[in-house]
Image (tube, rainbow, N blue to C red):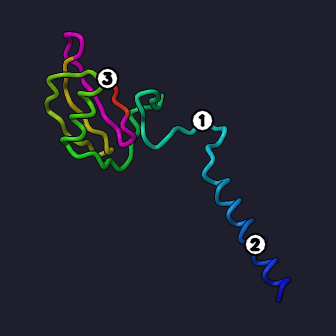
């Protein structure tokens, strides 16, 4: 009985170690699921299921330094598209599901 407990504990430990290893980013340059002020996916805007509401999308774009955000629409690729002002110029801007804000 003692041996079964030891074997079960060893198997549980191995399973935990394997599952932790799967959450480690690969060396293939994966980016985080959410953009932060210090990082942005270089391939943005990224297509995907976008969970930002219209109000949240507008707020996120404004936090990135854009003003007068208008015409905000979620396209068929899951990217919020709008027109906004930055540095006195009208630009097309996009917000993807990761939170990356890009001028196009």
Image quadrant in which you'd find residue 73: top left
In the foreground, 31 or 82: 31
Q: Mark 1 or 2 closer to N-term?
A: 2
Q: Please name the residue shown 24% across and 11% down the image.
A: 87
Which corner quadrant of the image does residue 25 belong to?
top right
Q: Residue at x 71, y 59 (%)?
A: 17
Q: Determine contact: label 1, label 2, CB under 8 Å.
A: no
Label 2: few (<14), some (14–19) or many (≥20) C-alpha neighbours in 10 Å: few
Q: Which mark is residue 103?
A: 3
Label 3: state its secondary structure.
strand
| Spot occupied by residue 93 in the image (x, y as percentages of width and height) | 27, 27
Q: Nearer the viewer, mark 1 or mark 2?
A: 2
Helix, strand or loop under label 1: loop
Q: Residue under label 2, please give it.
A: 11
Residue at mark 1: 29
Query: Within the magenta stretch, is there residue 64?
Result: no
* Most foreground residue, 11 or 76: 11
Q: Is residue 83 left or right of residue 94?
A: left
Q: What separation in Å lies between label 1 and label 2 (alpha carbons)? A: 31 Å
Q: Is residue 42 left or right of residue 12?
A: left
Instruction: Tell me which segment is drawn in magenta.
Output: 86-99
Q: Is residue 92 magenta?
A: yes
The Cα atoms of the two marked residues, 1 and 3, are separated by: 23 Å
* Of callouts 3 and 2, the N-terminal one: 2
**Which residue is located at x 39 percent, y 40 percent?**
98
Farthest residue toward the top? 88
């Amino acid at each position: 009985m003692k041996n079964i407990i030891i074997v079960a504990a060893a198997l549980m430990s191995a399973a935990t170690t394997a599952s932790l290893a799967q959450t480690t980013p690969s060396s293939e340059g994966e980016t985080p699921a959410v953009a932060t002020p210090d990082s942005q996916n270089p391939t943005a805007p990224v297509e995907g299921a976008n969970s930002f509401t219209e109000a949240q999308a507008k707020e996120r774009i404004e936090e990135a330094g854009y003003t007068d955000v208008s015409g905000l629409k979620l396209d068929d690729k899951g990217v919020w598209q709008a027109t906004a002002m930055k540095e006195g110029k009208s630009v097309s801007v996009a917000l993807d599901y990761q939170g990356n804000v890009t001028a196009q």
